Amino acid sequence: MPTLARDRLTWLTFTQLGVYGYFLYGFGPSVPLLRDELGVSNAISGLHGTALAAGAVLAGVGWPVLAGRLGRPATLRLGLLGLTAGVLAYCLVPLLPVTLAGGLVCGFFGSLVVTGCTVVLAAHHGPAAPAAMSEANAVAAGTGLIAPLLVGAGVSAGLGWRPGMLVAAAVAVAVWVVSRRTGRAAGAAGAAGAGGPAEMAPGAAPAGGDVEAAQDMPGRLPARYWLAWAVLVLCIGVEFAMTFWAADGLREHTGASPAAATAGVTAIVAGMFAGRLGGGRVALRVRPALLLLAAVGLTAAGFAGFWLSTAPLAALAGLAACGLGISLQFPLGAALAVQASGGRPDRGAGRVSFAAGLASGVAPFALGALADRVGPHAAFLLVPVLLAGAAGCVVALLRTPAAEPAQV
């Protein structure tokens, strides 16, 4: 059984991903507060999520080019600096075109950080990479716990939401300074070398691992893959719709203050943090597709508790349960998609990034547009519709014959 050695480079990479986790889970709750300042509609403010997603899609295209020219560690550090610039634009210039541009810049450079962390961990840890990635995402969720609290604390203290978000820029610069000093160590895992694990393209298996790197098979991705891909789109849509608009739901239906409602988004992230810490062990014992179906069901139950509650504490408990279910949906869905790719893992993994960009861009905007027409509380009914679609796709995936054994 592989073991995970958490050396200096590992902790540095965890920290870099944690910076983006802080930004991401502070960004969602800040959008309704920015909307109130700018006096725009829910749909227009939801375009900030669309801009973030568009940047992520562009990063999926830009990462291979930049990493090929600059090297992986340098591209990752560039992501930290670009994320800083995007946060400053978003926070310091209260004009809609600039805040939208800031979201786009944050999405692009923040996604370079995410991709870089994934590739460096894969190259550095070989067979233990899945464990390293699971812990890295738990760290990102852990730092994400802090962001809504600090954003809400700033509002409560009369300082507004900006100080809490500007923390992301300050920490990104600090981590950039540290990462420059450990550039040689990062280069050993990700920069050009002599054909070892650091030389592999993103998505390839590390040399010395259990599976040797190989070219994708020719042909189309099979139907099973697209079922798993659809599950990802629907589940990621739920995650971003909830993290963007849960604060508004708390304000409108439970009477929570803006500061308390913003801090309340921490309940979702806390559930995600707990789920990602323990979910890996459960996944070793339960068939992934069945576990994914259970996670969708838990998300639905938590959402019902949130949506039906008029008391803040009960609504927060529902959000925590919702986050616990959400925590497993992306890792399980992504794993199922790659397994169902029919010998085309690189292509399948690439399509997953587009699923994330599509869902994170469309779902928050759609919920905001619905809220303008029917009110925030009724608009949240979009979430169970997405969950029902995801559950249906998982059931169809279970019933679709596998081309290879043990794909689900």
Image (cartoon, helix red, strand yellow):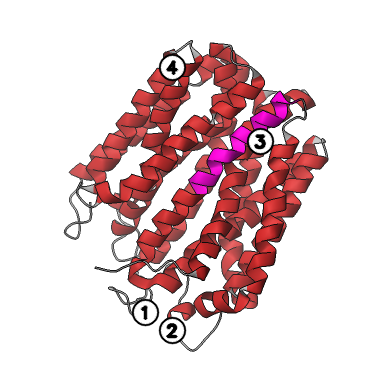
> Magenta residues?
140-157
Mark 1 surroundings within 10 Å by alpha-carbon count, few (fewer than 14), some (14 through 19), many (20 or more) = some
Queried whether the magenta region covers residue 144, the answer comes back as: yes
Lower position in the chain sequence, tag 3 or tag 2: 3
Spatial CA distance of label 1 from label 2 is 7 Å
Mark 2 surroundings within 10 Å by alpha-carbon count, few (fewer than 14), some (14 through 19), many (20 or more) = some
Residue at position x 55%, y 19% from top? 250
Choose mark 4 or mark 3, whichever is in front: 4
Choose mark 4 or mark 1, whichever is in front: 4
Q: Can residue 151 be seen in this view?
A: yes
Reading the image, the residue beneath label 1 is 207
Lower position in the chain sequence, tag 2 or tag 4: 2
Reading the image, the residue beneath label 2 is 196
Lower position in the chain sequence, tag 1 or tag 3: 3
Spatial CA distance of label 4 from label 1 is 50 Å
Circle 4 SS class: helix
- Residue 270: % across, % down: 46, 36
The answer to whether mark 1 and mark 2 are in CB contact below 8 A is yes
The quadrant where residue 113 appears: bottom right
Reading the image, the residue beneath label 4 is 314
Mark 4 surroundings within 10 Å by alpha-carbon count, few (fewer than 14), some (14 through 19), many (20 or more) = some
